[in-house]
């Protein structure tokens, strides 16, 4: 996707710990800890103004980066993230344990469920299989711990202390009126028709156009 962004943009594509080619021996897998990794990269690269974007779990991390670096991050962009009402607002203890038990007992089965939930009726089976294989290949315990970190993340609390404008590009057929009613006054939910939950992979050029079209004025 980054290949389709304008050449005059300075782009830092960051693999979170144990995502992509990144490897880590860490023991803490919270959204806040992922955000500290991103903040460290921005500091090392002497970035003093930025727009932070993240897909899925990365959307939660992007919010935390905005909260951590209010003077550096001018806008947060979440790609098909933050609006899933099965995750947000924060679940109670029993709901949390029920959700996590699915992944603890059968990680591959839990991942397959995520892929199916993020797919559309017209999503090709080969595309779903490709997404599944990539997600299920994550090394353990990082895969399970990352999901635990996301499930335990309190988005409402994070939003209360994140002042930047937030734009959420959401798959039109997956976003619900309930999500719009609850969070529409805190972040701008923009329905898109670029594919399934994994549209940044399925439609990289279209996703790049979405990113470049975001106005980055502060709230």
Image (cartoon, rainbow, N blue to C red):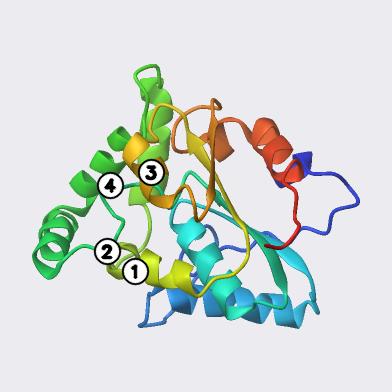
Q: Which residue is mark 4?
A: 111
Label 4, residues with CA under 10 Å away: few <14, some 14-19, many ≥20: many
Disc 3 residue crowd, few under 14, some 14–19, many 20+, Cα 10 Å = few
Please identify the quadrant where the C terminus is shown: bottom right
Disc nearer the start of the sequence (1/2):
2
Residue 116, by quadrant, is: top left
Identify which residue is drawn at 46% across, 71% down.
Answer: 160
Quadrant of the rendered image containing residue 47: bottom right
The residue wearing badge 2 is 90
Give the label, 3 or 4, closer to the camera: 3
Please give the label number shown on residue 207. Answer: none
Q: Are marks 1 and 4 in contact (CB under 8 Å)?
A: no
| Disc 2 to disc 3: CB gap under 8 Å | no
Residue 139 percent coordinates (x, y) = 36, 63
Residue topped by disc 3: 181
Q: Residue furthest top?
A: 122
The residue located at (40%, 24%) in the rendering is 126
């Amino acid at each position: 996707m980054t290949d389709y962004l304008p050449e005059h943009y300075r782009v830092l594509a960051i693999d979170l710990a144990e995502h992509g080619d990144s490897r880590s021996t860490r023991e803490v897998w919270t959204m806040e800890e992922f955000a500290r990794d991103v903040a460290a990269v921005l500091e090392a690269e002497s970035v003093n103004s930025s727009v932070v974007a993240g897909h899925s779990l990365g959307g939660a991390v992007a919010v935390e980066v905005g909260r951590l670096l209010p003077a550096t991050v001018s806008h947060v962009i979440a790609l098909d993230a933050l609006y899933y009402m099965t995750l947000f607002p924060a679940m109670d203890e029993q709901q949390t344990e029920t959700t996590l038990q699915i992944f603890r007992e059968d990680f591959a089965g839990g991942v397959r469920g995520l892929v199916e939930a993020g797919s559309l009726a017209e999503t090709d089976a080969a595309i779903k299989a490709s997404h599944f294989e990539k997600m299920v290949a994550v090394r353990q315990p990082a895969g399970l711990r990352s999901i635990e970190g996301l499930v335990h993340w309190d988005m409402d609390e994070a939003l209360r202390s994140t002042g930047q404008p937030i734009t959420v590009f959401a798959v039109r057929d997956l976003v619900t009126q309930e999500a719009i009613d609850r969070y529409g006054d805190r972040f701008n939910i923009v329905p898109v028709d670029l594919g399934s939950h994994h549209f940044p992979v399925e439609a990289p050029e279209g996703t790049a156009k979405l990113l470049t079209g975001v106005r980055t004025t502060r709230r």
